[in-house]
């Protein structure tokens, strides 16, 4: 990575940066932000509702605690109610063992004040993960030296191939903007069978857990647009910044809404880095 | 002493040897003793005066010692002269009408060898003559509105970024031409985007006219003859782009002797040679330029630095053949490449290569025929050498064409032209080819091909001495043709989520989609008097090829698309009205031009559009309309010691695209209502001159966040639903340059030094604003170097480029 930085520095050696104050607009009315995850793992299932704030307002984000939240199985019409959990500051199923079933479709309903929101998703079967391996690699152009993990598996699906991997290193989730690992089948899926390398250099003794999500297309697009926005530097080479397209609809009320509803299957695998060999 | 002088004067000897022997004897017998007598106190300096452009003798040149004007002599028919001098050193002045005066200090050493004085024609190159000498009132008299011609000599005098004289950046100083931002060469003309400009070199289009990601344009100024910018009404013989024609010509070589010029600059050097080829009926010019940024990298002892490459180069050449008294053939070619290489593992390169041939025939004194053929190719390649994920990603697009035009000059008052143009576009598949053992699957889009045939005719008619008209019509017939594929979507809905219900494959040259369009061009001029006229024009243009992008600056990997089943051609109608007034015997030009322009079917991209590798690009595109209007003021002085212009433009540009900005109108980024430029050049003396430019424009139209929210453990800026409602701060900048030319000593080698400063007063003009979290109150916080995060807050970080950037260039001619 060092040499890339050097070259980029050489190219941009005539540029400088400084922090400035700009006259920015403000939010006229509260804008709820909904993050809803409904998966086959109860631990992950929750609905967070917060409010957007003015850009330079550095106070804590407001959490919406008085909404009504439930999910309906669109086939069986089973209603799964949620309650606000003060510990997590989010809504969780009243029956905490409830979870999404593969092949079923679900619809989210939220009522907050005079506003009603909804979204839907289909629970898709997860791919197959065979194994995790790791190997010590020397420095290359786009990566530093260290231990690199490969995920071997199989994706036997012809469509709806939208995936996300989250990596937890020693109980810490990697959540910088460059930690998003999203892939679809644009470049084929052979790489998953031949070993998908996680682009992190780990050290001996690290305990690594990965979570593999199979997403619906809309939340996948939401995350790709989110990453694009996080990298948007406002310069000439960037597209005009836009909020990621939410898959949540406003049924009634005048409020805008941000966020996503993701129905996803989740696979988790762990590995401990123990030595210099596989 | 006299014999010594004679012995070293071959020209004088030559003359005398051709004289009768008796005369020679007479001269010898009767002048020698006398000369011997005066030689004790007067030396005779003998030399020859020549024209530097072709080495022909200049008879009748005045020669005198600066401190003794009465001692003057006049050069002979072969350019030779002899003049006596008593004390040395002394300054000898050689002057001739139409040439720059040469002053040289003569010392006793100058008597030891033959001396020549090469006089340079006064600095009136062809392009300047067009504007300043032949038609000083052309801006008032001609039919053209919205046309600007900038002499290459003027462009060379404008202070330049890094000292690199840049044609396109110079055009940005004209009214009605906007720039996307600091340091970029993209032109946005009268509300049109950069891909709506036809940039052509000797009649062949250049698809990516920039180097270094847009910081420099591809044109080496030494190789150019002239540039014409049409931003309003353009003749019917031109078409294919909506907003502007930037018509650049390579210069032809001289037919007398080898001549060269070049320069050694801060980041690049250039050299141009021209002269006769085989005989005086044919000439050549060849020109090259190369940067040496990577050569500096190689000076490093660090292999992480010296193994990298970063360069661009240009090569161009032009051959001219006078086939007969009535026929002339020119062949020209340009090739330019950029390359960025990181170690031996990553490479990004792109290349323009164009070739053209032009045959001109004078069928009679009133009928002329020109036939142009060209081929333009652009390609890029991205290579990544990695054992697991290595690939080569490349694309190639080309345009080939032929254009024939007949011009008939029926009388001074009536001129007509007619002709045809055929263009073939071939956009090859974008290919991603995995390297051996790579885990990536190969990928290729389908090719796109198009044929555009156009017929055109036009007439310029001076109805009365005061009223003239120019009418023209261009009729384009466009076919997107095979080989290719079209997809059919469920319900006919073009959306990334739409399902493909069928696909249709087309064989080579099988018609896929046909469009045709009439493009009328009409202009009037009414001459109130010799120095005042009013002009009006209307023109329509169709464009069948464009870039699918929603960023403001061009990238080498931009995706060009053709009009087809789902993407109609874009169309622009423009009306313009102008007042043109010259003052002080045409020394000053003043003009006011207003315009209104209407765009149809221009495209934008969906949020998060993925366009680089998709074969269904129509699902990523949004179609809309636009309009632009403005008023341009220009005060210009072309002659005298001080030249330049002051220009002010007030303009607005709007877009309205369903799916963008809630379907309401919005400004593109390059909408900059106020635009003021001042360009000055002053010649203090034959040796010293200076240039100064000042630019003031309204800031770019952009979107700033109105809020902030947390999602997926990220702090995310919240943007308004309405696009580009905010503005960068106003942009202003002053550049200055000083040029020093060595006193002309009549020698062939002439050098000059140019010292320029970009952004003289160090204005921090924003290039970008980044809205992000700032950790530990350090905008350059690095987790690896600065330890754990203690504080975090939202902030705005401004990036700016090029404050007070000096550069120096040595230019030479021989």
Image (spheres, rainbow, N blue to C red):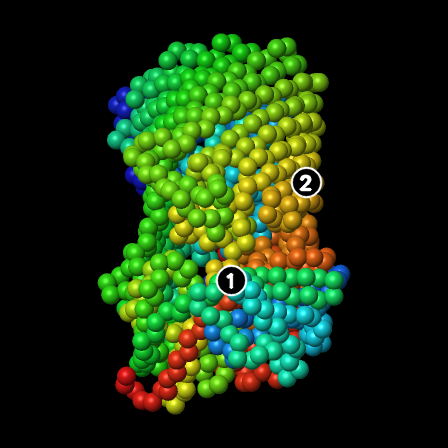
> Could you tell me which chain the residue with mark 1 belongs to?
A
Q: Are marks 2 and 1 on the same chain?
A: no
Q: Nearer the viewer, residue B346 or B121?
A: B346
Residue B62 appears in the rendering: no
Tell me the residue at 66%/52% (across/down): B722
Instruction: Please provide percent x and percent y for residue B454.
Output: 43, 24
Q: How many marks?
A: 2
- State which quarter of the image contains the N terminus of chain B: top left
Q: Which of B597 and B288 is in front in this view?
A: B597
Q: Is mark 1 on a helix, strand or loop?
A: loop
Tell me the residue at 28%/64% (across/down): B438
> Could you tell me which chain the residue with mark 2 belongs to?
B
Quarter location, residue B770: bottom right
Q: Is residue A99 left or right of residue B114?
A: right
Quarter location, residue B706: bottom right
Tell me: residue A161, above or below residue B255: below
Instruction: From the image, state whether disc 2 or disc 1 is nearer to you.
Output: 1
Give me the disc on residue B651.
2
Q: Distance between the residues labelled 2 and 1?
A: 58 Å
The residue tagged 1 is A75
Tell me the residue at 36%/65% (across/down): B342
As drawn, the residue found furthest toward the right would be A28
């Amino acid at each position: 990575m060092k040499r890339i930085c050097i070259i980029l520095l050489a190219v941009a050696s005539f540029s400088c940066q400084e922090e400035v104050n700009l006259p920015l607009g403000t939010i006229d009315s509260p804008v709820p932000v909904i993050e809803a995850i409904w998966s086959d793992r109860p631990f992950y299932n929750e609905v967070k509702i917060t409010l957007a704030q003015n850009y330079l307002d550095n106070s804590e984000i407001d959490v919406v605690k008085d909404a009504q939240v439930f999910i309906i199985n669109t086939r069986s019409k089973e209603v799964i109610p949620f309650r606000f959990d003060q510990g997590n500051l989010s809504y969780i199923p009243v029956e905490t063992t409830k979870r999404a079933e593969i092949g079923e479709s679900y619809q989210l309903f939220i009522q907050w004040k005079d506003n009603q929101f909804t979204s839907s998703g289909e629970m898709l079967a997860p791919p197959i993960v065979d194994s995790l391996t790791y190997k010590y690699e020397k420095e290359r152009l786009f990566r530093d030296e260290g231990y690199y993990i490969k995920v071997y598996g199989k994706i036997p699906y012809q469509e709806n191939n939208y995936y996300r991997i989250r990596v937890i290193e020693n109980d810490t989730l990697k959540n910088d903007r460059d930690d998003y690992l999203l892939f679809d089948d644009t470049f084929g899926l052979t790489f998953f069978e031949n070993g998908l390398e996680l682009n992190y250099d780990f050290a001996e003794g690290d305990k690594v857990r990965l979570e593999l999500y199979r997403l619906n297309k809309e939340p996948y697009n939401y995350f790709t647009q989110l990453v694009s926005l996080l990298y948007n530097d406002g310069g000439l080479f960037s597209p005009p910044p836009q909020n990621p397209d939410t898959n949540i609809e406003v049924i009634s009320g005048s409020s805008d809404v941000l966020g996503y509803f993701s129905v996803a299957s989740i696979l988790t695998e762990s590995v401990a880095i123990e030595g210099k060999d596989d | 002493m006299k014999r010594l002088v004679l012995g070293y004067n071959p020209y004088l000897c030559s003359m005398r040897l051709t004289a009768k022997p008796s005369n020679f004897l007479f001269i010898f017998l009767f002048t020698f003793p006398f000369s011997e007598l005066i030689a004790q106190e007067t030396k005779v300096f003998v030399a020859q005066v020549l024209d530097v452009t072709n080495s022909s003798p200049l008879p009748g040149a005045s020669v005198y010692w600066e401190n003794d004007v009465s001692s003057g002599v006049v050069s002979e028919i072969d350019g030779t002269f002899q003049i006596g001098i008593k004390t040395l050193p002394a300054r000898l002045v050689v002057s001739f009408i139409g040439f720059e005066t040469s002053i040289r200090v003569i010392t006793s050493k100058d008597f030891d060898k033959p001396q020549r004085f090469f006089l340079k024609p006064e600095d009136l190159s062809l392009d300047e003559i067009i504007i300043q000498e032949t038609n000083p009132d052309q801006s008032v008299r001609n039919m053209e509105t919205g046309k600007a011609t900038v002499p290459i000599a003027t462009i060379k005098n404008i202070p330049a970024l890094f000292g690199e004289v840049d044609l396109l950046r110079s055009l940005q100083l004209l009214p009605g031409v906007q720039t996307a931002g600091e340091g970029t060469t993209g032109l946005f003309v009268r509300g049109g985007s950069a891909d709506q400009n036809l940039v052509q070199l000797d009649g062949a289009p250049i698809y990516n006219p920039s180097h270094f990601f847009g910081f420099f344009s591809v044109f080496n100024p030494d190789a150019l003859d002239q540039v014409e910018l049409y931003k309003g009404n353009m003749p019917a013989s031109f078409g294919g782009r909506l907003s502007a024609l930037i018509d650049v010509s390579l210069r032809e070589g001289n037919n007398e002797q080898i001549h060269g010029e070049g320069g050694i600059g801060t980041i690049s050097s250039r050299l141009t040679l021209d002269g006769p080829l085989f005989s005086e009926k044919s000439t050549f010019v060849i020109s090259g330029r190369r940067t040496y940024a990577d050569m500096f990298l190689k000076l490093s002892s660090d292999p992480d630095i010296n193994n990298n490459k970063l360069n661009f180069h240009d090569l161009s050449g032009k051959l001219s053949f006078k086939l007969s008294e009535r026929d002339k053939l020119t062949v020209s070619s340009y090739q330019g490449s950029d390359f960025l290489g990181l170690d031996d593992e990553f490479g990004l390169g792109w290349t323009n290569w164009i070739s053209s041939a032009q045959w001109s025939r004078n069928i009679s004194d009133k009928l002329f025929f020109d036939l142009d053929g060209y081929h333009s190719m652009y390609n890029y390649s991205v290579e990544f050498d990695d054992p697991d994920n290595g690939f080569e990603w490349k694309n190639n697009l080309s345009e080939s064409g032929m254009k024939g035009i007949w011009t008939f000059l029926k009388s001074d008052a009536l001129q007509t032209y007619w002709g045809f143009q055929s263009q073939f576009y071939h956009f090859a598949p974008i290919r991603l080819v995995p390297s051996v053992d790579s885990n990536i699957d190969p990928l290729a889009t389908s090719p796109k091909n198009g044929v555009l045939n156009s017929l055109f005719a036009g007439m310029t008619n001076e109805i009365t001495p005061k009223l003239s008209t120019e009418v023209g019509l261009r009729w384009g017939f466009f076919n997107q043709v095979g080989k290719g594929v079209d997809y059919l979507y469920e319900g006919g809905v073009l959306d990334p989520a739409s399902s493909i219900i069928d696909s249709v494959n087309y064989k080579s040259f099988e018609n896929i989609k046909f469009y045709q369009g009439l493009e009328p061009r009409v202009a009037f001029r009414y001459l109130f008097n010799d120095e005042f006229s009013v002009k009006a024009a209307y023109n329509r243009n169709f464009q069948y090829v464009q870039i699918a992008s929603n960023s403001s600056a061009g990238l080498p990997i931009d995706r060009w698309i053709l009009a087809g089943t789902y993407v109609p051609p874009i169309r622009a109608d423009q009306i313009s009205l102008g007042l043109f007034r010259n003052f002080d015997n045409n020394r000053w030009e003043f003009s006011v031009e207003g315009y209104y322009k209407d765009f149809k079917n221009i495209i934008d991209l969906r949020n998060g559009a993925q366009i680089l590798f998709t074969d269904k690009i129509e699902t990523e595109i949004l179609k809309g309309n636009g309009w632009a209007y403005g008023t341009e003021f220009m005060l210009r002085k072309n002659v005298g010691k001080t030249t330049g212009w002051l220009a002010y433009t007030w303009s607005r540009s709007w877009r309205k695209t369903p799916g963008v900005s809630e379907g309401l109108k919005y400004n593109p980024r390059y909408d900059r209502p106020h635009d003021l430029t001042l360009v000055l050049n002053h010649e203090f003396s034959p040796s010293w001159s200076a240039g100064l430019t000042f630019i003031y424009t309204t800031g770019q139209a952009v979107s700033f966040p109105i809020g902030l929210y947390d999602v997926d453990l990220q702090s995310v800026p919240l943007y308004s639903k309405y696009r580009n409602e905010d503005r960068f701060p106003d942009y202003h900048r002053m550049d200055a340059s000083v040029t020093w030319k060595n006193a002309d000593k009549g020698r062939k080698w002439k050098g000059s030094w140019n010292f320029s400063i970009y952004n003289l007063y160090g204005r921090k003009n924003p290039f970008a604003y980044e809205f992000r979290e700032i950790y530990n109150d350090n905008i350059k916080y690095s987790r690896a170097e600065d330890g754990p995060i203690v504080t975090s807050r939202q902030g705005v970080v401004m990036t700016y480029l090029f404050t007070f950037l000096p550069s120096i260039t040595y230019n030479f001619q021989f």
